[in-house]
Amino acid sequence: MRRVMRGFVAVGAGTLLLLATIAAPAAAAGPEHGTGGFSYDLELPAGSVCPFALHWVEDGSRMQALTFPVQANGDQLFRYSGPQWSTFTNLDSPGVPPLVVGGGLRLDLIFHANGTADVRVDGTVVVLYFETDAPGPSAWLLHGRTHDTLDAGFNTISHAFNGKAVDLCAALAG
């Protein structure tokens, strides 16, 4: 009986050691690295963001992307950093020249296990809000620190900002 028990303990300890060897690097693994951020080519109808129809072209193709492992509490962080450029055109007033804006940023998207999310940005970012968002329909170029909280439906329920803001709808009004 003693010999069988010793063999079981040896196999059990060996299995635990093997599992620890496999699991430790996975638990200590850093984020996955990637390239390319957000790129869009959207036409938004009048009233959805601005009083006029808006064409938005976004190029974040040179951004770096990090995907962090899911934490024990179920939260997961996605981080994007680098340059982004946007071109906005007032489709209802062809005489108004397009507005080109850009800059660098670090954007953290934190998805929580309960379905909500936090969006934190340091740097220059374009933010569009729709009628279901707390600030209401608007388009902004923000330079500074931004923190938005989103509900499970991806609607902005709180907005905090410190820095310089440019109202893109006002800048493009014809």
Image (cartoon, rainbow, N blue to C red):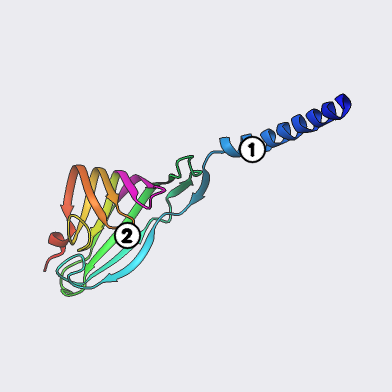
Instruction: Report if residue 106 lies within the magenta region.
Output: yes
Q: Nearer the viewer, residue 43 or 9?
A: 9
Residue sitting nearer the eye, 22 or 160: 22
The picture places residue 133, in percent across and down from the top left corner, at: 22, 58
Quarter holding the C terminus is: bottom left
Tell me, for residue 135, which label it has, or none: none
Label 1 neighbourhood size at 10 Å, few (<14), some (14-19), many (20+)? few
Kind of residue sitting beneath label 2 = Gly
Residue at far front of view: 1
Q: Quadrant of the N terminus?
A: top right
Q: Residue at x 45, y 54 (%)?
A: 36
Left or right of residue 45: residue 13: right
Residue at 46%, 48% (x, y): give it: 65
Q: Please report the bounds of the magenta region as a residue range.
A: 103-122
Closer to the chain start, of discs 1 and 2, is 1
Q: Amino acid at mark 1?
A: Ala
Q: Secondary structure at mark 1?
A: helix
Q: Relative to 19, does residue 116 appear above or below in the rendering?
A: below
Residue 4 picture location, percent across and down: 86, 30
Looking at the rendering, which quadrant does residue 14 occupy?
Answer: top right
Question: Can you tell which quarter of the image residue 97 is in?
Answer: bottom left
| Residue denoted by label 2 | 153
* Residue at x-position 20% and y-position 72%: 53
Judge from the rendering whether residue 17 lies leftward or rightward of residue 93; answer left or right: right
Q: Residue at x 75, y 35 (%)?
A: 15
Whether residue 37 is in magenta: the answer is no
Say which of 18 and 169 sits in front.
18
In the image: residue 164, left or right of residue 34: left
Residue 70 is situated, as x and y percent measured from the top left of the image, at: 49, 44
The residue that label 1 is drawn on is 23
**Element type at mark 2:** loop
Q: For residue 29, which quarter of the picture?
A: top right
